[in-house]
Image (cartoon, rainbow, N blue to C red):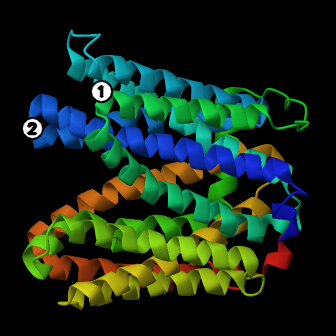
Amino acid sequence: MRFLGTSNPAFLKLLTFRVLIVLAYQIVAIVVGWHIYELTHDPLALGLIGLAEVIPYFCSALFAGYAVDHYSRRWFAISACLLLCLNALTLTAIAAQWIPDNPVFLIYASIAITGVARAFIGPSYSALFALLLQREQYARAAGLGSSVFQFALVAGPAIGGILVGWAGKTAAYGIAGGLCVLAALALLSLHIKEPPAAESAPIFTSIAEGLRFVFHNQIILGAQSLDMFAVLFGGAVAMLPAFIHDIFHYGPEGLGILRAAPAVGAVITGLFLARYPLNKHAGRWLLIAVAGFGLCMIGFALSTNFWVAGLALLLSGVCDGVSVVMRTTIMQLATPDAMRGRVAAINGIFIGSSNELGAFESGVAARLLGLVPSVLFGGGMTLLVVATTAKLAPKLRRLELDQLQ
């Protein structure tokens, strides 16, 4: 893995940017939830946090992909960091009561701006990833990038909770803002020569070109659809509080353990695949991983022992880690350089919609079918999605990475 060391410090700086910006985002997310509930004491207000971010994210994502493809990859990412920093400082001022008028409205407005900023981060990272690495290095780098991302997803909420309890909301927001500045500095320190700006096609024509590329590319569409439907139907994370309370009879610490288990599995898998990439039978491994994820969800639903359930979720993280690394590698290799921003933006919409709608689907299914049957149904649907994709996307099923080199 020499290319990940001193021979490619630019890639390490890109990973530094990614871990810092995800940590900052996750810290703000956990603190905002606490802050809103303190002000409103209304559970619905917590649900509106996700809505306040997702709507502007969806509205901005395709335009962000267009901008990254046609202009600077790095400067849009730096601008997003600075916008997130500005939001964190605004929230700091609200928490310190320097802005006393209508704080709830201002918090939601800040969350909405966060959604716009986040729309630029994924496409920029994807474009810079391809710019800094050679194609034969993508598989290893995707494994390491996945581990860094999963680590930040786990560590961010934990750090945010500790900061709120130890130093208060104002300090937590301020530290998140500082992490955003450090993420921007990591990108500023990159010494790279970006390709010249692409010829500026009409914006909606360019976006439509990106959509046509994804929806007419059996490999990319199949990989994205697998991930979307697996999360949409197979995820049990949204139902964990109910399982902890009604099935396992554990306290909040049990919820923390089960929430962390999939991420731990994904981090370990990402590090392993960074060292030992799956260069053969890429499509087959992707299908097997998503099928394994569905089986783990079924195993979790049938578990009555807390630690057996934790093991099932750990293994689901292993399967998800394989899926993420393979999908990321396939997308990077199959996407033309001129379309990386738009394809990454479309992928972000697939993933973002599946996370939000998946939580909604889990709640509706649990209400209609019951807690355990709803997760069994989701796991079964995941297996059906794998079988359907394998049938309808033979190019993905038979894919070898060297076909994309």
Q: What residue appears at the point 78 percent right and 82 percent down from the top-left corner?
A: 279
* Front-lying residue, 384 or 175: 175
Could you say whether the residue bearing mark 2 is in a helix, strand or loop? loop
Q: What residue appears at the point 22 percent right and 43 percent down from the top-left corner?
A: 47
Return the residue at label 1: 108
Q: What residue appears at the point 22 percent right and 90 percent down from the top-left corner?
A: 302
Task: From the top left corner, tell me how far across and down residue 26 is, in percent.
Answer: 42, 46
Kindly indicate the quadrant of the structure image that contains residue 236. bottom left
Quadrant into which the C terminus falls: bottom right
Task: From the top left corner, tell me how far across and down residue 323 is, in percent.
Answer: 57, 74
Callout 2: few (<14), some (14-19), or many (20+) C-alpha neighbours within 10 Å? few
Image mark for residue 50: none
Callout 1: few (<14), some (14-19), or many (20+) C-alpha neighbours within 10 Å? many
Q: Residue furthest front?
A: 166
Q: Is residue 115 above or below residue 228?
A: above
Return the residue at label 2: 42
* Front-lying residue, 253 or 203: 253
* Front-lying residue, 214 or 244: 244
Task: From the top left corner, tell me how far across and down residue 319 is, in percent.
Answer: 51, 80
Could you say whether the residue bearing mark 1 is in a helix, strand or loop? helix
* Front-lying residue, 339 or 269: 269
